[in-house]
Amino acid sequence: MADARRDQIVAEARILLEAEGEAGLSMRRLAERLGIQAPSLYKHVPGKRDLQAAIVADGLRELGAALAAAPPGIVGLAAAYRAFALAHPHLYELMTERPLARDLLPPGLEDEVAAPLVAALGDEHRARAAWASAHGMASLELAGRFPEGADVDAAWSAMAHAFGAG
Amino acid sequence: MADARRDQIVAEARILLEAEGEAGLSMRRLAERLGIQAPSLYKHVPGKRDLQAAIVADGLRELGAALAAAPPGIVGLAAAYRAFALAHPHLYELMTERPLARDLLPPGLEDEVAAPLVAALGDEHRARAAWASAHGMASLELAGRFPEGADVDAAWSAMAHAFGAG
DNA sequence: GTCTATAGTGGGATAGAC
DNA sequence: GTCTATCCCACTATAGAC
């Protein structure tokens, strides 16, 4: 059942997404990159939604690995989270700006990614609040929504401090 | 210089945006609602960007009024912020998911809206972090990104608590 | 597994007549 | 101030031949 062509399509779709953003990921352009015509994609992938879900799953696995490898404590987790978001802005958006396609994701993956946060924050609600805070910082930073002179590093520090970092 | 027709166009554009989201706000559909043809809009508004900026300015004014009227303290501000976002999801997205068109906004408006937060949080960096945290909570909630069973109220509480609410 | 051809839908914006 | 006509662009997806 391993469909090598499918894996290649997903990989190329991710490259396209990361390079040009969600709007740039069209079936036409993806096919063009692969040297085939757009309709041919549908022999390997049911549709765009499945393509996106496969990319999101990859992103979640990588974010999970980055958080698991981060220095212990809230500061380390926040830095790792921020670094991932800034390194993969368009992927990060795809991962956070819509409901997770949980029906198309490997079971348990979402919880695995969150585990280091829950461990560091002590309980589920605090972990969720801390995640949301980091997401808010990352998403405003990625969107270019802060004013030009804003000290974003200081804001990240203040956030980590609020959640208990010395 | 008051162009009543322009005001009407902006008002209708906001209604359309709030009803159907950013993707639903097209010049064609806006014109249709107003009973004119799309090209006629351009006699009153330079383009879509200006239209969006006018809507965002309205939203900022309303959010600022809501924050200024909120019960003092972090919990009250957080509740008012959340209420605004949940009441105007599509407007809120337009206000936060892209760089502010500061060149098309009334000068000083952005700072006015933020003033209650800066006052409550004590300094600029903490205020920015708290804003980002509230934005993260609101945006994940609006996006339907939390898992189904998640206790979002508890997460909002944990967030307010982290920033110093008793 | 790929192709051609094509269906259908939507978008922003402009020129020029009236 | 509104219109018609039109330009250009983009997209998802399908049918059917090879």
Image (cartoon, coloured by chain):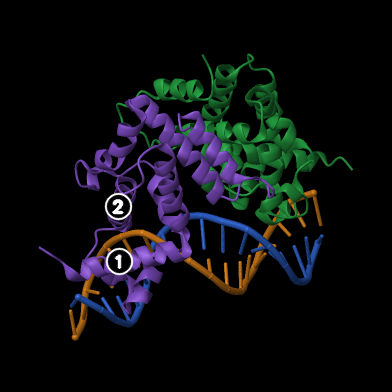
Chain colours: A purple, B green, C blue, D orange
Residue situated in front as seen by the camera: A94 or A23: A94
Image coordinates of residue A35 in percent, x first then y, are 33, 79
Image coordinates of residue B113 in percent, x first then y, are 70, 31
In the image: residue A2, left or right of residue A46: left
Image coordinates of residue C5 in percent, x first then y, are 35, 78
- Mark 1, residue position: A11
The residue positioned farthest toward the right in the image shown: B1
Q: Amino acid at mark 1?
A: Ala
Any part of residue A52 in sight: yes
Label 1 environment density (alpha carbons within 10 Å; few <14, some 14–19, many ≥20): some
Marks 2 and 1: which is nearer the front? 1
> Circle 2 marks a residue in which chain?
A
Residue situated in front as seen by the camera: A107 or A28: A107
Any part of residue B147 in sight: no
Residue situated in front as seen by the camera: D4 or B158: B158
- Regarding mark 1 in the picture, which secondary structure is present there? helix
**Looking at the image, which residue is at 63% across and 49% down?**
B99
**Looking at the image, which residue is at 53% across and 31% down?**
B134
- Image quadrant assignment for residue A29: bottom left
Q: CA distance from mark 2 to mark 1?
A: 12 Å
- Regarding mark 2 in the picture, which secondary structure is present there? helix
Label 2 environment density (alpha carbons within 10 Å; few <14, some 14–19, many ≥20): many
- Mark 2, residue position: A53
- In the rendered view, tell whether residue A2 sits above or below residue B106: below
In the image: residue B166, left or right of residue A41: right
Q: Amino acid at mark 2?
A: Ala
- In the rendered view, tell whether residue D6 sits above or below residue B63: below
In the image: residue A42, left or right of residue B25: left
> Circle 1 marks a residue in which chain?
A
Decide which of tag 2 and tag 1 comes sooner along the chain.
1
**Looking at the image, which residue is at 34% across and 46% down?**
A67
In the image: residue A78, left or right of residue B131: left
